[in-house]
Image (tube, grey):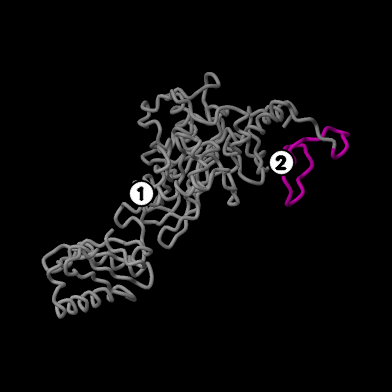
Amino acid sequence: MSRPMFEKAMLGYLPLCADNGRELTSVAFMCKKDQCTGQIPGTTPAIPGMFPAMFPLATGQPFGALPVMPVQAMTQQATRHARRVYVGGLPPTANEQSVATFFSQVMAAIGGNTAGPGDAVVNVYINHEKKFAFVEMRSVEEASNAMALDGIIFEGAPVKVRRPSDYNPSLAATLGPSQPNPNLNLAAVGLTPGSAGGLEGPDRIFVGGLPYYFTEAQVRELLESFGPLRGFDLVKDRETGNSKGYAFCVYQDLSVTDIACAALNGIKMGDKTLTVRRANQGTNQPKPEQESVLLHAQQQIALQKLMLQPGAVSTKVLCLTQVVSPEELINDEDYEDIMEDMRGEGEKFGTLVNVVIPRPRPNDAAPGVGKVFLEYADIDSATKARAGLNGRKFGGNQVVAVFYPENKFAQGEYDD
């Protein structure tokens, strides 16, 4: 390859057919067959195990005296992390050309092209085995606009559009807009604004350690105890549709980001512990300089709101209602028979530690009368019991089984 052609390749006009140690250029099909060896013709062969030679040496030029990279090429390289988008969940039929054509057409349809006429996509790399692609845009702004395309249907399947793992939010903020243009015509491609498209930027929150049975509505309600969300995504397995136990969100009021992180991080959810932090920060995130009273209050609000949902958090204690009536608990023999029946039923699902059936007291309104509490040795047994007992008929009544807070049970508070 001649020197002028090499510089054009560095400027993005021609592809370099080389393995850069991380991924293969996806447009290698444009290269001549005898030039796709990862080596520029006329250069010294690459040392095995080392990166291929990227700069040809002129005749008589001493080794180590590399030519200066053109300024535009340096700019292209510096902005590349902010111009690429990750597209996941691709169908097996996807290829580089179909992905490039699709996203170029979609970007034009929503009004997302800002770098002038022509296609927004300049390069595509596909990993067919893992069904994802890196799509490189012409500009940082166009890549940010592409973030609004999360969930778009490509060849019959919804795909995820995210930032790549090497995306640097702080650096990207100096290169161009980091959020999609709010005036994009997403309706033109069947998308609704304000869903997952608002999930980018330094205020994106990672929420990990979620119990797998938590629904989107339950996670949303927990997070929204601190304020309305601008974007939310509960990550699910593509094959099963089940939650993977973590989510991302962005608040409309960015000032509550650190408060929510500090209040929710470390909360016990059944047998799991929440990890809540800014997505672009490590696990050693310092707590914000807020009053401890405020943080405690916010945490209590979140917990109380969550506890209002029957059975939202799994515990070792199960509360059964619609099982017995107060009248059936007055006679001692009847009471003992009911205790034995409930113990026998409860032991079918695991190790039963305790059975509590509050009884009515003369001239006193005893708390919890009409309820049956089953305490198990572990959450797994309680979960099995809930699945097995909820909805069953007992004495002509349909049983309602929900998890009950362990601390309230331990304190003898049965009236919740």
Q: Which mark is residue 108?
A: none
> Could you tell whether 407 is left or right of 38 in the image?
left
Q: Main secondary structure of the magenta part?
A: loop
- Is residue 52 on the magenta stretch? yes
* Front label number (1 vs 2): 1
Q: Nearer the viewer, residue 314 or 107?
A: 314
Determine the image quadrant of residue 149.
top left
Amino acid beneath label 1: Lys
Dot 1 falls on a residue whose secondary structure is helix
Q: Which mark is residue 39?
A: 2
Q: Which residue is mark 1?
A: 305
* Disc 1 to disc 2, C-alpha distance: 62 Å
**Residue sitting at x 40%, y 57%:** 211
Amino acid beneath label 2: Gln
How many neighbours does mark 1 have within 10 angstroms: few (below 14), some (14-19), or many (20 or more)?
A: some
Provide the residue span drawn in magenta: 40-64
- Is residue 106 on the magenta stretch? no
**Residue sitting at x 34%, y 70%:** 381
Dot 2 falls on a residue whose secondary structure is loop
How many neighbours does mark 2 have within 10 angstroms: few (below 14), some (14-19), or many (20 or more)?
A: many
The quadrant of the image that shows the C terminus is bottom left
Sequence-first tag of 1 and 2? 2
